[in-house]
Amino acid sequence: MRSYSFLFFIFLFHNLNGQALSDELRFAQHLVVKKNYEEAIFVLNTLQQNPKLSLIQRDSIHIFLGNIYYNQKDLLRSNNHFDSVSVVSHRLSSEAIFFSSFNRAYLKSYSEAKQKMIRYVPIDSTERQLRFLELAGLSLLQRDFKKFDSLQHFLTPTNFVTDLQEKDLREQQKKILSQPKKSPFVAAALSAIVPGAGKFYAGNKGQGVYTLLISAVLGLQAWEGYHKDGPSSVRFIAYGTLFTSLYIGTIWGSAFSVKLRRDQLNETINDQILFDMHIPLRTFFH
Amino acid sequence: MIKYYLICTFLCAPFFIDAQTKLADSLLAAGNYLQARVAYERLLYQGYSLPNDVLLKKSYCLKAQSQYEEAYNTLQRADFFQGADSLKFNLYYESALNAYLAGKYDLCLSKVQEQHYYLPELNSPMIDLLEIMALNQQQKISDAEKKFNQFVTRYQLPNPNPYSNRKFRKLKNPEKAESMSHLLPGVGQMYAGYVGQGLVSLGIQAGCVTFAVASFIHGYYFSGAYTGVGLFYMFNNGGARHARYLAEQKNKERITELNSEVKNVAAKAIKK
């Protein structure tokens, strides 16, 4: 009887240990759900030091920490944890790979993000669709339209997880292709003829009008100084210098504003593409 | 035999819960606030029978870490209709205090009013003080004064009454300061109590006008119009906005000073 009791306690202790670790993980999940991130990080970091953790439990901790840092927009730390997830559980490793790839896309490491997706082997149709959507999004971010067009054949509007975003990615491609191609040289030349006209041409109409007005104001004062006091007068030299500086600055600024405007438009489109890549991941995994 | 083991296991549960409560309290007492927060949250997760008590203590940890908004949100997870009146009162008081410290004066006042409504028989100079200070922060000086007079009567405190000081009764009007500086450059700043800055603003704008007039007299119409009048217009607008900002700053300073005096008077009631 005594030996049975001893065995019972050994069994109970072993079970309690495993149970305690699972309970602690569930507690960490409760903290994440309640958005008590500081507490959750503390619990998970403490739990991570336990040598008795199974591989799946270790992976779950990395997933939790990856998601917490992802929510806190600390993407580098988030990636450190997602990249530490093993391949023991497909569910956990797929979540880690998709989010790690997305984080890299957000950090503009497009090639790395693409490599992650290319190496990933999906196990069902939804995962396959998700993978194609992410790859299509990455191709658009890299402005690789050939690749995007080739991936379009695989994007079939049959899955609720990816359906809307697939449509929107096509819209984004149209937006990119329909962007007006404006030349910085034309903008600079226009501003050299009429100050501010280059900015107007670049799409910054308000700035164009404002620059024209300021140039006119300074030009008229320089002309007044020249007309009344001659070319060596302080008034003419002061206003003339101001006008010339503004004139040269406007030419350079107009050429630059074409690039700036293009960058702003691309930034807006890229944000929308990232949003389209992000929504299905949240729907599917969370 | 197994029956005895099970009885033993079930008897252990309350013992563990009690031990965890003590552990959480000792962590709070030792100033290990993050660990204490985890310990309290664990009690809630395990379905501890006194959740309001635990949430209150968790809010103490967050308050000690200056996370006032989070402390307020934690307290809002409590059921304000459960438990002893003293505990409910503490929940209201801590909610109001954390809302005040987080700069959310409307929430602070709302919690004070809830306390007055649901627990009218419980009074504390601390919660009355919070109400007066929150009203001051919202610049509802006459309401704050009424509450202050009730407070002084209730706790039979000696004067002085800080509200009798004219500078606290009449706060600066930022709109008025802005309008004044538009019409008479620099006067808005002087009204806000910054005479030096008012004189500088007046000097600059006077210089612009002088330049404009001199330019017109000598036939420099473009220079007069664009440099003189243009700069005057810019400095006038900027000066007016600055006067408004200075009036707002002055009001903040005065309210801080007023609240400090109110606290000095209230300290006597709290000592009592």
Image (cartoon, rainbow, N blue to C red):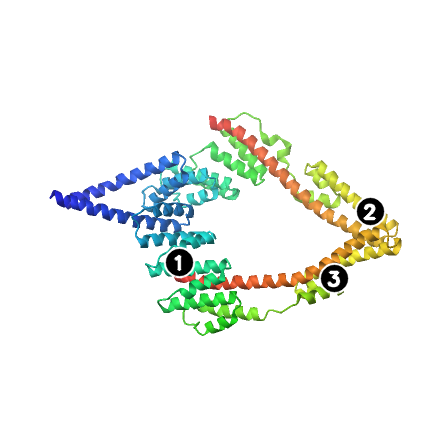
- Which residue does the image show at 47% across and 42% down from the upper left? B67
Q: Residue B40: image x %, image y %?
A: 36, 41
Report the front residue among B41 and A187. A187
Q: Quadrant of residue B59?
A: top left
Q: Is residue A27 left or right of residue A169?
A: left
- Image location of residue A179, percent across then percent down: 60, 69
Q: Nearer the viewer, mark 3 or mark 2?
A: 3
Q: Is residue B148 visible?
A: yes
Nearest to the observer: residue B158 or residue A88? A88
Q: Earlier in the sequence, mark 1 or mark 3?
A: 1
Q: Which residue is mark 3?
A: A195
Q: Which mark is residue B211?
A: 2
Between A77 and B221, the residue placed more toward the observer is A77
Q: Quadrant of residue B179?
A: top right
3D distance between C-alphas at marks 2 and 1: 69 Å
Quarter of the picture holding the C terminus of chain A: bottom left
Identify which amino acid the numbered label 1 is placed on. Ala
Provide the secondary structure element on which disc 3 rests: loop
- Residue designated by label 1: A96
Task: Return the chain for callout 2.
Answer: B
Q: Alpha-carbon distance for marks 3 and 2?
A: 28 Å
Q: Is residue A284 left or right of residue B176?
A: left
Mark 3 falls within which chain? A
